[in-house]
Amino acid sequence: MNILMLSDVYFPRVNGVSTSIQTYCRELVRMGHAVTIVAPDYGIPDTQTEFEILRLPSRKLSFDPEDRLIKRSSLPALLRKLVQRHWDVIHIHTPFRAHQIGVRLARMTGRPTVESYHTYFEEYVANYLPWLPRPIGRFGVRLFSRRLCADVDHLIVPSEQMAAVLRDYGIKTPATVIPTGIRLEEFAGGDGAQFRQRHDIAKDRPMLLTVGRLAIEKNIDFLLEVTARLVPQFPSLLFIIAGEGPDEERLKHRVAELKLEANVRFLGNLDRRTELLDCYRACDVFVFASSTETQGLVLIEAMALGAPIVSTAVMGTASVLRSQGCARISAPSSESFAHQVGGILKSPSLRQCLANAGPEDAAQWAAPALMTRANQVYEAIVRRNVEIN
């Protein structure tokens, strides 16, 4: 099949959506499909050659300079170009310009559309527009989502929890739950000792790690409070925060307020093929507390690399961590969370037991098996489209 992917975000912008799209594209190519992705131009040349990438002129967003908005003026020329090519499936990953392009192209060509619902927008509205009364925000998100989903033939959602949210919104578009997997072979290396040596971290220094975008919805404030509770018991404790984002400066001020300068380091984005793997291997406990994740890919990465996990289990993370031997689930209180982390830090045997369980737990999230299900969705909507037409 010839598959067109459309997104308002993609690498070099680092986040879960970019990772998910890259996994989709690579696995579909491995299956023998031809894949083209349309995404914003970030001013950095593409170096990968596995699939075609069409970059569109874009502009920065004043409230979030990491992201780009595809320029509306580029759409007519793009549509003229795309309509001349044959697509079996149009897969839309984000709800802004990408959605507009996909829906218009589908109407022009009669091709079937799939849309991934990656983001729990209702919680984002609450976080980023706190002045907006919550009932109004919820009404707006639900109305927006119903209209968005009504435009496409099929939905892919990464967890049953997100599927339940959409049903509660009254969305009737057929949906399939397909989590995004990882390529296990890419998360089988890593050298924790080398990471500690490079960053001058003593081999016996207790180390916590979180990985992700530095944004309010990731709940890193909570993890800083957990760290503050643990430091009296573990004075040399080091909390590594790997990632970048708009909340970085505020979080650094919060570290200073809590007097944790000696116990917290911000390392920015780490190379996913080298340094990030070493970082996972180096940590004693991987900690995560986001309440807005539709899945939580970093949890699966941590599993694969043998990092013991302590996390709350809200939305998609509940699916990822259900019955996993490598993780301990905490109530959403800093006291309970610190108790779980402290128990692991004090017990080398427990830590080793959790670490040993991780790779086996991660195996169920292998990308090839999960992408076979996505391929089945594509085949079904293509058949249905042929029957209708």
Image: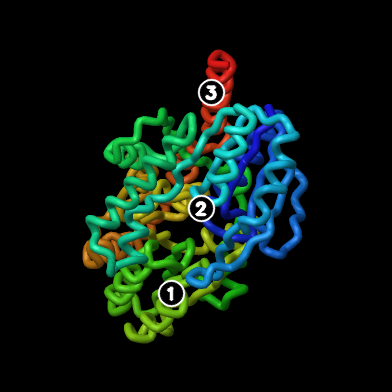
Q: Is residue 344 among the parts visible in the rendering? A: yes
For residue 308, above or below residue 261: above
Q: Nearer the viewer, mark 2 or mark 3?
A: 3
Q: Is residue 353 among the parts visible in the rendering? A: no
Q: Secondary structure at mark 1?
A: strand
Residue 243 x/y as whole percent: 52, 66
Q: Which residue is mark 3?
A: 381
Q: Residues within 10 Å of mark 2 (few under 14, many from 20)?
A: many
Q: Marks 3 and 2: in contact by CB < 8 Å?
A: no
Q: Name the residue rendered at 57%, 66% in the picture.
A: 269
Amino acid type of the residue tagged 1 in the rendering: Leu
Q: Is residue 237 left or right of residue 201?
A: left
Q: State the separation of the CA atoms marked 2 and 3.
A: 26 Å
Q: Name the residue rendered at 62%, 41% in the picture.
A: 5
Give the numbered dot on residue 16.
2
Q: Nearer the viewer, mark 3 or mark 1?
A: 3
Q: Which residue is mark 1?
A: 238
Q: Name the residue rendered at 72%, 33% in the picture.
A: 34
Q: Secondary structure at mark 2?
A: helix
Q: Is residue 325 left or right of residue 28?
A: left
Q: Secondary structure at mark 3?
A: helix
Query: Tag 1 or tag 3, which sits nearer the N-term?
Result: 1
In-front residue for pair 100/290: 100
Quadrant (top left/top right/bottom left/bottom right) for the N terminus: top right
Locate residue 104: give its quadrant. top right
In-front residue for pair 70/292: 70
In-front residue for pair 39/163: 39
Q: Name the residue rendered at 41%, 77% in the picture.
A: 251
Amino acid type of the residue tagged 3 in the rendering: Ile
Q: State the separation of the CA atoms marked 3 and 1.
A: 50 Å
